[in-house]
């Protein structure tokens, strides 16, 4: 064995050791979950259900109402955007509406049966164009739950799409995003649980600069979490007492945003 053998053996051992050593990549923070809504939930479409023959005429009526208010130089300060629960301000809640919101030339853009895709169609077809409200009160999504038992993450993502669309049309308006109201008698009902999960996600959309989140649901429920027919006779839509509670509980936040 010549003198170079030990050195060659040592070099070989060093190379083997290096080959077996790996560099551990730095730990990365987990990615924020990204939920993709159902395609139909974000595909704008007019409500063409067999029972909704009034839907497109109502849309046209709302556009005419906006034109009339503008012609009279009445500034629409508050807009309510939603489904049948919001439309109910024109019926069960009309006395409360006239007392609390008529002074703001408030506009009711609630359409019975609306899901996220119907709201998106309305936003893209002129319902908030040409107006400059201080606040838009937003609540919808319960029909995604009730109509097709849509996953909470999907509905919440679709609502976010609608909020983004609303922001494009009304960049300077404050959005008051309400938690979807409770439904069904018992808190463990599937639809109630889905809506509560949607609300949990919606709360994260608030930046408290232009978008604000408000959950008044406890005021609508009994202490044990049950929903009373004294407030929602069909366990979905408020009666006048329910609209009184809504107006009362929302008033402090709405007044703050109107200022």
Image: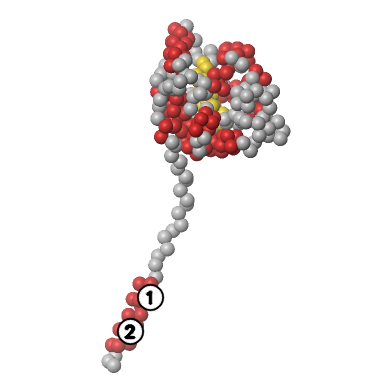
Helix or strand or loop: what does disc 1 sit on?
A: helix
- Residue 111: give x, y in percent of width and height: 50, 20
Q: Of all residues shown, which one is farthest toward the bottom?
A: 1
Between 110 and 177, the one nearer to me in the picture = 110
Quadrant that contains the N terminus: bottom left
Q: Position of residue 2 (x, y in %)?
A: 27, 92
Relative to 7, does residue 206 appear above or below in the rendering?
above
Q: Is residue 168 left or right of residue 109?
A: left
8 sits to left or right of 164: left
Q: Residue at x 54, y 31 (%)?
A: 146
- Residue 38, numbered circle: none
Q: Quadrant of residue 186?
A: top right
Residue 207 in sight from this viewpoint: no
Quadrant showing the C terminus? top right
Name the side, left or right, on which 95 lies relative to 136: right
Give the residue drawn at x 44%, y 10%: 64
Total number of numbered labels?
2
Residue positioned 49% across, 13% down in the render:
75
The residue depicted at 63 percent of the width and 13 percent of the height is 95
Residue assigned mark 2: 9
Q: Give me the C-alpha separation between circle 1 and circle 2.
A: 13 Å
User: Which badge, 1 or 2, is on the more N-terminal residue?
Assistant: 2
According to the picture, the residue beneath numbered tag 1 turns out to be 17
The quadrant where residue 223 appears: top right
**Place of residue 58 in the rendered image (x, y in percent of width and height, measured from the top left):** 47, 14
Q: Element under label 2?
A: helix
Relative to 172, does residue 76 appear above or below in the rendering?
Answer: above
- The single residue placed furthest to the top in the displayed view is 72
Q: Residues within 10 Å of mark 1 (few under 14, many from 20)?
A: few
């Amino acid at each position: 064995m010549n003198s170079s053998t030990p050195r060659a053996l040592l070099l070989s051992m060093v190379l083997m050791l290096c080959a077996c050593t790996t560099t551990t990549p730095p730990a990365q923070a987990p990615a924020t979950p990204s939920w993709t809504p159902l395609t139909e939930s974000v595909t704008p479409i007019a409500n063409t259900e067999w029972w909704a023959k009034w839907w497109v005429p109502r849309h046209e009526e709302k556009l005419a109402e906006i034109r009339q208010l503008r012609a009279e130089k009445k500034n629409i300060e508050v807009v309510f955007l939603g489904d049948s629960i919001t439309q109910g301000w024109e019926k069960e809640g009309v006395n409360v509406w006239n007392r609390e919101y008529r002074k703001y030339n408030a506009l009711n853009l609630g359409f019975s049966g609306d899901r996220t895709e119907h709201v998106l169609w309305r936003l893209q077809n002129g319902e908030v164009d040409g107006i400059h409200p201080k606040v838009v009160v937003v609540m919808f999504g319960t029909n995604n739950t009730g109509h097709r038992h849509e996953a909470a993450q999907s509905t919440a993502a679709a609502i976010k799409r609608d909020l983004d669309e609303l922001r494009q049309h009304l960049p300077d308006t404050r959005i008051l995003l309400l938690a979807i109201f409770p439904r069904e008698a018992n808190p463990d009902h599937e639809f109630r649980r889905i809506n509560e999960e949607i609300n949990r996600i919606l709360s994260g959309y608030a930046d408290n600069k232009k978008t604000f989140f408000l959950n008044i649901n406890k005021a609508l429920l009994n202490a044990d979490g049950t929903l009373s027919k004294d407030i929602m006779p069909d366990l979905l839509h408020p009666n006048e007492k329910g609209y009184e509670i809504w107006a009362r509980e929302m008033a402090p936040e709405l007044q703050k945003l109107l200022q």
